[in-house]
Image (cartoon, grey):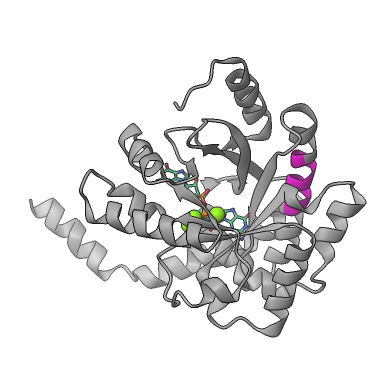
Amino acid sequence: VAKDGGRNGFRYFTPALQEVAQTRMRLANDLHDALPGHQLEVHYQPIVHLASGTVRKAEALLRWHHPSRGMVSPAQFIPIAESTGLIRDIGEWVFQQAMAQVAHWRAVHDPGFNISINKSPVQFRLGVRAHAWPEQLHQRGLPGDCMTVEITEGLLLDASPEVSQQLAQMRQAGMHVAMDDFGTGYSSLSYLHRHPIDILKIDQAFVRDLGPGSPTLALCKAIIRMAHELGMQVVAEGVETPTQRDLLAEAGCDYGQGYLFARPMPAEVLDGWLRERQSLPASND
Ligand code: C2E
Ligand code: MG
Ligand code: MG
Ligand code: MG
């Protein structure tokens, strides 16, 4: 007991904030080497069409294999990449990876395959040329609709003319725009019809507590219905159980993404996963 008390006492006096700041500074320093040092990798998580069980979409999720700390979560290093400006090169690299990958999956798996990439508000602010991504797709002979850009509510909260222009350019080129983490931001619903959004991604916070008769089920149903009436499709994030999947499918949710179906994985692993799945009789998992 005394030992525990002592430890707690010690912890109490640890300048925790300073430690956090120090870790952050070290990570910021190390992050400069991540791209040239080949420490970054893009993983892909399948997005499943709930009614048919088919997979022709995946989300690109960045991974950092730190040389001494092991895997560092994007939740931890993306903010650092943003504050250091490194997000510019890293985001460009993610796009290049995803573009090569979607070309491959369209060739060998499904000609309509689509990959989602996350683009943070800071990336929009740092972006120089709005048409850069559509142009690169075009140069590679890929149609715009092979890619979806995931944005967050915060981007539209005080969307500058430049942001609106970038969104419009991507949309004109056929790229899809998805609202990520829907329901967790602070913005009002009014932005939904003022900006071109194709897909709503219901945040996993709503999916987590889904049960028959639960309040979150009512919320999910309302979101799905509203999205459909506005002409959008719906993806549920963080689907972990068959019950959640069934309730969402019953509520008319179009797609599900989550550990129930598959975790994010390296491209070559998803390659095998897609092949195996294709050869199996249709199933909803
Ligand atoms: P997000 O875009 O909302 O991505 C979904 C997150 O949920 C991913 O976390 C994914 O691994 C996780 N997830 C998927 N299925 C489940 C599930 O069934 N249960 C639970 N508990 N979690 C699940 P991850 O990969 O750690 O990424 C965290 C966030 O980092 C992303 O959230 C996104 O905002 C950001 N991020 C990741 N890659 C990039 C990137 O390339 N660029 C930018 N700007 N942001 C990125
Ligand atoms: Mg996302
Ligand atoms: Mg999300
Ligand atoms: Mg998120």
166 part of magenta stretch: no
Q: Residue at x 79, y 71 (%)?
A: 130
Picture coordinates of residue 235, whole percent (x, y): 50, 49
Q: Is residue 284 left or right of residue 90?
A: left
State how many labels appear. 0
Picture coordinates of residue 108, whole percent (x, y): 77, 27
Q: Which of the pair 217/27 is nearer the observer?
A: 217
User: In the displayed structure, would residue 31 be above or below residue 251?
Assistant: below
Q: Is residue 118 left or right of residue 108?
A: left
Q: Residue at x 58, y 61 (%)?
A: 78
Q: Residue at x 49, y 42 (%)?
A: 257
Q: Which residues are magenta?
A: 95-102
Q: Residue at x 47, y 70 (%)?
A: 21
Q: Is residue 40 left or right of residue 183?
A: right
Q: Which of the pair 250/155 is nearer the observer?
A: 250
Picture coordinates of residue 133, whole percent (x, y): 80, 60
Picture coordinates of residue 17, whole percent (x, y): 38, 72
Residue extending farthest to the right is 139
Residue extending farthest to the front is 229
Q: Quadrant of the C terminus?
A: top left
Q: Which of the pair 75/152 is nearer the observer?
A: 152
97 part of magenta stretch: yes
Q: In the rendered image, which quarter is residue 266 located in?
A: top right
Dominant SS type (magenta): helix
User: In the displayed structure, would residue 121 be above or below residue 58?
Assistant: below
User: In the displayed structure, would residue 168 be above or below residue 114?
Assistant: below
User: In the displayed structure, would residue 273 be above or below residue 78?
Assistant: above
